[in-house]
Image (spheres, rainbow, N blue to C red):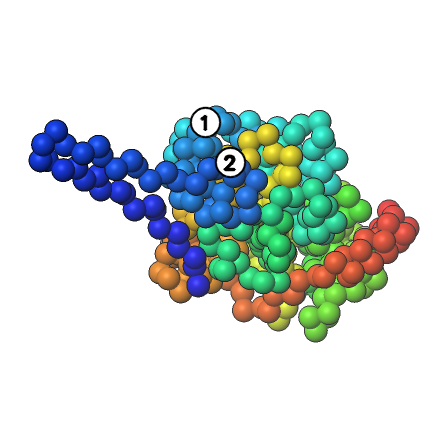
Amino acid sequence: MTVRISAAAAVILTATIAGCGAPATPDRQLPPVKPQAASLQEGFSTMEHLVETARKEGSLTVVGLPRDWVNYGEIIDAFSEEYGIKVDQLEPDASSKQEIESAARLKPDVFDLSLEVAVANAAAFAPYKVQNWQDIPDDVKDNAGRWYAGYGGYMSIGYDPRKVAAPTSYGDLLKPGYSVSLPGDPRHSAAAFNAVMAASLSRGEPQAKRGVEFFERLRKTGNLAASERTASAVLDWDYDNAERSGWKVAIPGDAVLSSYYVQAVSKNAPHPAAARLWQEFLFSDRGQNLFLKGYARPARMEALQMRGTLDRELAARLPATTAKPVMLNIPEIDAAKAYLQRAWNGKTG
């Protein structure tokens, strides 16, 4: 159930008209602002008070947010326009790991991170639970409010229908005519790593060894492309593949690898109120639907659907699938990454 915080009631001033008149009762003051508080009510009492405090700070610093990634360009512009707060966009192509490594130098107010990076660096984040906290699935948020999923996606096969037929399984990619690419080196790119793990799924169970062997078979058949530019199929998140002009997206099988990117407020945020206002915006109905416009699956999607606030036209554009989502847990991620570091180059190089 969504926690709704009502605005403080206005105090009606009364005065005695008789005689010279009694002095008016003073306005009831809101509690002092606590910018480091872990909730809107505790820190700012009302949304209006949070907005006012954030506007006084004047700006928000973000890092690692490409404007063409899950509609972040429009999201940033909408936030800035609505609240009159300048958004400083630093190093948009930084990875989750690089966001953390550059934090002391860049001093971001907020983070957008892969789950494993967020879990490993939770001590660097300030607890803050947005008003719609209850709508976020329990398995993708920290109980203390230090990080929580904002949006996610499904691993998919993007393909050029002018060159190849729609793949009905990952095995189809081994057939003549396919030229398959990854969005980077899976030892360094989160998307490429997850693509290898998606190809490894068997009866819903991931296994890094199986994924590496699949790409070894692609290489031996001559179907492993040198780059995305020469490929007729790319294994990537559905929100990235959906943006490829003229391409289509397939999510084959009865299980699909799913993952979320999580949001966090920096413990050392130079603009703590603006950082918390940013989170409230991202997790509002408007913010979540803006992620949906970028083909991402909002963390509050089920709640929006139940309340009738999900943009149905945007939701209808998502690649269709009946596959059951599978999420890797942290031990699985760590073990798989360690295996790829050892085996990837020898098998696919």
x and y percentages locating residue 109 in the rendered image:
59, 34
| Vertical arrangement, residue 3 with respect to residue 113, above or below | below
x and y percentages locating residue 154 in the rendered image:
60, 57
Question: Dot 2 lies on which element?
Answer: helix
292 relative position to 191: left or right: left
The answer to whether residue 290 shows anywhere in this view is no
x and y percentages locating residue 123 in the rendered image:
71, 46
Residue at position x 46%, y 37% in the image: 32
State the residue lying farthest toward the front. 19
Q: Are marks 2 and 1 in contact (CB under 8 Å)?
A: yes
228 relative position to 222: left or right: left
Residue at position x 74%, y 58% in the image: 330
Q: Quadrant of residue 157?
A: bottom right
Q: Quadrant of residue 124?
A: top right
The answer to whether residue 171 shows anywhere in this view is yes
Residue at position x 40%, y 44% in the image: 46
Question: Dot 1 lies on which element?
Answer: helix
User: Which residue in the structure is indicated by mark 1?
Assistant: 56
107 relative position to 56: left or right: right
Report the front residue among 61 and 165.
Answer: 61
Q: Amino acid at mark 1?
A: Lys
User: Which residue in the structure is indicated by mark 2?
Assistant: 273
The crowding category of the residue bearing disc 2, from other C-alpha atoms within 10 Å (few below 14, some 14 to 19, many at least 20), is many
Between the C-alphas of marks 2 and 1, the distance is 9 Å
Report the front residue among 1 and 334.
Answer: 1
